[in-house]
Image: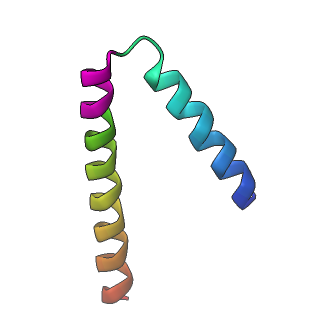
Amino acid sequence: MQADEYVLLGAALALEIAEGLSGDALDVAAALYTAIGDQLALISAARAKTK
């Protein structure tokens, strides 16, 4: 997948996730996905360091 396709996929997923969520629920979802992304980055960095 090309880099721009990841950007488009991310935008499409965000729009689908946000559909029908209240402002408060959207805030919580955004924070949750940020936390998940941070943890995935940490796992990736830790794996790269052990190789």
Q: Residue furthest top?
A: 20
Rendered image quadrant of residue 22: top left
In-front residue for pair 46/17:
17
- Identify the residue at image location x=37%, y=71%: 44
Region in magenta: 22-28
Q: Position of residue 16 (x, y in %)?
A: 53, 22
Rendered image quadrant of residue 26: top left
Q: Is residue 27 magenta?
A: yes
Q: Quadrant of the C terminus?
A: bottom left
Q: Is residue 36 magenta?
A: no
- Identify the residue at image location x=29%, y=69%: 42
- Identify the residue at image location x=72%, y=49%: 5
30 in relation to 16, above or below: below
Say if residue 17 shows up in the picture.
yes
Q: Please state if 7 lies on the left or on the right of 26 as rendered.
A: right
In-front residue for pair 6/26:
26
Q: Position of residue 50 (x, y in %)?
A: 30, 87
Task: Name the dominant secondary structure of the magenta segment.
Answer: helix
- Identify the residue at image location x=64%, y=50%: 7
Say if residue 1 shows up in the picture.
no
